[in-house]
Each structure stands twice: as structure tokens, then as C-alpha cells.
Amino acid sequence: MNYDRKFLLWALGFAVFGLCVGIYMAASQNHGQLVAHAHIMLVGFVVSFIYAIIHKLWLVTPGRWVARIQFWLHIVCTVLLSIGLLLLYGQVYAAEWLEPVLSLGSVGVLLGMLLMGYMVLRSGSGRVSAT
């Protein structure tokens, strides 16, 4: 399966997850998870969807290892960030316990973005194949 399709499927999964959190907030009339909901929708759904488009339009066959590392780094760290924020804003665990998880997730998402930037820069102006 190509990375464009993998990112698209994960994006849709994050969208469903984020929408469920939003529906829960509306039904309970407790909007305490707003920050977690926004991160799930933006980092999970929107960024993953944009990565799918980039892979489809610009990165036909990106460097195999860079693409694999970037994909898993983004997905794993987005899940860590999403769950960490849900636990934090749901007041399940104290901030000092969740800070390492949230830091790791945030830095991992940033590194994933930098790796995507590297692949795009390396691709030049159009679709590329791995060398």
C-alpha cells in the first residue's frame, strides 16, 4: 500500500475519532476536551490528509526509509499527543505525569513535519522516484 493511501486511511480514522470526541462534548455539555479535540482534528486529520496529498501529487516513490520513518513517526506521535491531551484535559492524570508523553508527541510530530519538508525539497518541482 502506498503512503498516500496509508495517510488517507489514518486521516479518516483520526477524523472519526475527533468527531466522536466532539459529539461527546456536545452531548455532555462539557467542552473540557476542546484542546484535545482540536489537536486530533488538526494534527491527526488535517495534517495526515495533507501528507496523503503530498505523497499523491509530489512523491511518487520517496526514499523508502525516510518515508517509512516519517510515516510511523507522525502516526505514533499523533496518537501519543491525542491520548495524552485527552487524559490531561479529562483530568485523569496530573500534568507532571503527562508532560513527558506530550513533549515526546509534540517533538515527534515536528520531526515528522521536518522529514516531510526534506522529502518535498529533495523531490524538486515535480513527482520524483527514489534514487
Image (cartoon, rainbow, N blue to C red):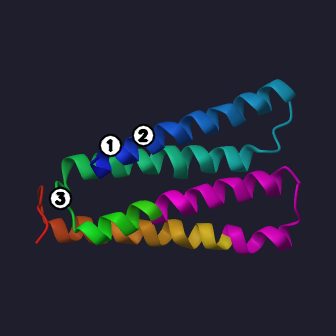
> Dividing the picture into quarters, in which one does residue 69 lie?
bottom left
Residue pictured at 45% horizontal, 62% vertical = 72
Q: CA distance from mark 2 to mark 3?
A: 19 Å
Question: CB atoms at circles 2 and 3 under 8 Å apart?
Answer: no
Is 96 rendered above or below residue 67? below
Q: Which mark is residue 5?
A: 1
Using residue 118 as the reference point, say whether residue 42 is left or right of it: right
**Location of residue 83 with respect to 22 vertically, above or below:** below
Q: Residue at x 39, y 71 (%)?
A: 114
Is disc 1 placed on a helix, strand or loop? helix
Count of marks overlaid on the render: 3
Q: Which residue is mark 3?
A: 61
Judged from the image, the secondary structure of the residue bearing numbered disc 3 is: loop
Judge whether residue 84 is colored magenta.
yes
What amino acid type should be assigned to the residue bearing mark 2? Leu
Label 1 amino acid? Arg
Q: Is residue 110 left or right of residue 30?
A: left
Query: Observer-nearest residue: 3 or 47?
Result: 3
Which residues are the magenta region? 73-102
Asked whether the residues under the numbered discs 1 and 2 touch, taking CB atoms below 8 Å apart as contact, a structural biologist would say: yes
Look at 89% across and 54% down and name the residue there: 91
- Characterize the magenta stretch by its predominant secondary structure: helix
Label for residue 115?
none
Which secondary structure, mark 2? Answer: helix
Q: Position of residue 28 (x, y in %)?
A: 86, 28
Query: Which residue is painted at 56% across and 73% down in the image?
Result: 107
Give the CA separation, mark 1 to mark 2: 6 Å
Membership of 114 in magenta stretch: no
- Disc number for residue 9: 2
